[in-house]
Amino acid sequence: MESFYDTIQEQLAKHSEIAKNIDLNVLSQKPGFKIEQFNNLIYIGQMCNGKKHGTGILKVVDSFKMYMGEWLEDQKSGLGYEKFSNGAEYYGSYENNKQNGYGEYFWVNGELYKGNWVDGKKSGYGEWNSQNQWYKGEWNNGYVEGRGVYQSEKGDLYTGDFIASMKHGMGEEQFANGDLFRGNFINGKPEGYGEYFWKCGSFYQGFFLNGMRHGQGLWQSSNQNLCDKYVGAYQFDKKSGYGEFTWVNGTIYKGWFQDDLRQGFGKMFSKGILIYQGEWENDVQAEKIRLKFQSKQKTLDHTAQHWKHTNVNEIQELEDESNISEEENVIFQDSMILPKKKTEKFRLTTLNIDNKTKSHRISPMKGSLKLPKSTVQSQNQKHRAQSYNQQNKQIIQQNRNRAFSTQNQVQMTNKQLDQSQKLSIPKKGKIKLEKLK
């Protein structure tokens, strides 16, 4: 009881309004004063017909939970102070055992709400404060709802409509970096028509979707007459679709955009004169891309032809000589000996041999092998003739074998036919035929 008494005195010292109504010495003299304990509950105060009625104190043993104030037939009603089990505190009006009317709620983490309550929930005008943010405005059923002003932890200040504790409806938000947005909000983000003003002086007027520029809009680099300006379509915060862009020097582009780049068909005007009309690709004129590609391809072709080669005509002649026609191929198969063409000079040019070597007209491969030209040629011809004669002998022998086998088969077949004919002829005199009557 002593610790309970000390707790009561401590709380009464904090709340002078309750201390005026609750004085333990005075309270003990009031009619119906009792001290009762119900399981883990202790009640000190007035009672009527077995119910808490009047002024009284209810404390939960071994817990922070406690209520001091006015009662009406066992229900908290009137001015009171309540400390909850989580350490939070409330001081204000009660009705039907719930917060109703004006009251102040203190969280353990330092948050504070001062305002109106309805059936235990924040409703009506109220002010909420935290360490780095605050809100002043209307509440409904425990949520920020209606018109109000909110400052975020970053320092952004929003003034406008709220629904379910989110920016929803018309409002204006002044950002900590100096930017300003004025327009419609849905679920906490700009959506619909709005106007955004950057600190640098540029601004946008048009439509938004989920916090991004989306739809038709106007952008200008400044509010002066001489400035860059774009009028057209946006998609997900980027110029996409048909639009017109005007530079500060008077140049105008009218055409299609994609991801902030000119893409598709468009026209360029300079001082009112059409200077280009055609396709664009990645913010570059397609004609320039084509010419650039052709120039690059031409350079590559030229480099491929002249790299390591000083005489293109000799290379072309060498390639023509390397292509053998069908007639030449037949002649080669028949004769097995192809007359050797003099291609040393072209081969020397192709292999980048020094100019001194060109005068000798010697193949580098034959020179490295150090074999006489006549010896190599005669050996190759002998080898080809031998292989050719051997192939002819094999073919003749195969034809002879086939002829012998065919002749044997014909003889065997004739013998079989003769035997079958002899067996089929009937013997005379042994078979009598009866005449038909």
Image: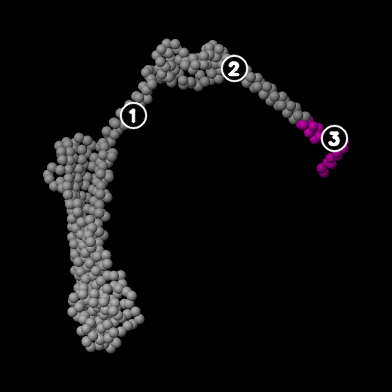
Q: Is residue 314 left or right of residue 169?
A: right
Residue 68 lies in what quarter of the image?
A: bottom left
Q: Nearer the viewer, mark 2 or mark 3?
A: 2
In-front residue for pair 33/300? 33
Residue 30 located within the stretch drawn in magenta: no
Three-letter code for the amino acid on which mark 1 is drawn: Gln
**Residue located beneath label 1 in the image:** 297
Q: Which comes before the other along the chain, label 1 or label 3?
A: 1
Alpha carbons under labels 1 and 3: distance apart: 99 Å
Residue 383 numbered tag: 2
Question: Does dot 1 land on a helix, a strand or a loop?
Answer: helix
Q: Which comes before the other along the chain, label 2 or label 3?
A: 2
Is 79 drawn above or below residue 194 in the view shown? below
**Residue located beneath label 3 in the image:** 427
In-front residue for pair 326/373? 373
Q: Position of residue 410 (x, y in %)?
A: 73, 27
In-front residue for pair 278/188? 188
Whether pointer 1 and pointer 2 mark residues with C-beta atoms closer than 8 Å, the reply is: no
Quarter of the rendering occupied by the C terminus: top right
Taking the view exactly as shown, the residue that stands out farthest to the left is 225
Is 390 drawn above or below residue 5 in the view shown? above
Dot 3 alpha-carbon crowd within 10 angstroms: few under 14, some 14 to 19, many 20 or more: few
Q: Which range of residues does the magenta coloring cover?
A: 416-437
